[in-house]
Image (spheres, grey):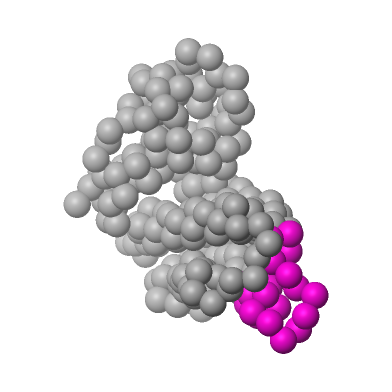
Amino acid sequence: MAIDNKYKGSDRLSDLIDDNFKLLMVMSRFGISLGFGEKTVEEVCNSENVDCNTFLAVANFISSEQASFSVEEQPQLSIHSLMDYLKNAHVYFLDFVLPMLRRKLIEAIDCSREDNVAFLILKFFDEFVNEVREHMQYENEQVFVYVDSLLEGKLSSKFNIAKFATHHSKIDERLKELKGIITKYYNESSDNMLLSATLFDIYSCEQDLASHNLVEDCLFVPAVMHVEKELRNE
């Protein structure tokens, strides 16, 4: 099943954002700045040096939430551009959203005692962040380096993208456990609104991480497999 191309290059970028505000993050991770006025997607991408077809592929994929991708029907997909998107997503999670969530958790719960649920929540969160960091550093330092080499026409006898896909962990799943601990067992908050707002942000982060994984699994991996196949056939 191919991606339903709901959005076109001739659409105004502001209309895409109004239709699905989650595309703000897609736009940001492609390095597109706000203040684009009435420009179309194609005009904005051209002015920001972003591959328009790749931007549209990601935007349509995330909006349709389809878990499959036909590389043959997206022949102009830029793997370089897609890697830039994924690397920027890693920066967003590791340097911005996860530290922000930790600060909010500390403010919302009482971590002064080591024998209560609050301490367990913070410990669980820190372990989760370490897992995410290791996961994304592996992709940055191993997978993306391999793909850069692949795009230079160099096949490796020790690694291929299928090995990465087979062991690609779902880093959002531990957040489900954290949510359960907070909602079921923590009742010591002096500011229920703040804790609820923090929990809402955790839910949003979980969805964002799940979407990030799908882009890797359903867009990036098949596109890289296509390049590997072409090189083997040469």
Between 166 and 176, the one nearer to me in the picture? 176
Q: Position of residue 228 (x, y in %)?
A: 40, 62
Question: Chief secondary structure of the magenta span?
Answer: helix
- The quarter of the picture where the C terminus appears is bottom left
**Residue placed farthest to the right in the image?**
112
* Image location of residue 165, percent across then percent down: 41, 70
Is 160 left, or right, of 129 in this rendering?
Answer: left
Q: Is residue 148 left or right of residue 225?
A: right
Answer yes or no: is residue 58 visible: yes
Q: Which residues are magenta?
A: 106-127
Is 108 contained in the magenta span? yes
Q: Position of residue 47 (x, y in %)?
A: 56, 21
Which residue appears at 40% of the width and 76% of the height?
A: 166
Question: In front here: 206 or 135?
Answer: 206
Q: Position of residue 76 (x, y in %)?
A: 37, 39
At 40% across and 58% down in the image, what residue appears?
214
Q: Nearer the viewer, residue 4 or 171?
A: 171
Q: Quadrant of residue 100?
A: bottom right
| Residue 160 included in the magenta stretch of the image | no
Pick the front one: 107 or 13? 107
Q: Residue at 53% of width from left, 41% of height from top? A: 25
Q: Is residue 165 above or below residue 58?
A: below
Question: Eyeballing the image, is 8 above or below 182?
Answer: above
Q: Answer above or below: position of 112 versus 136.
A: below
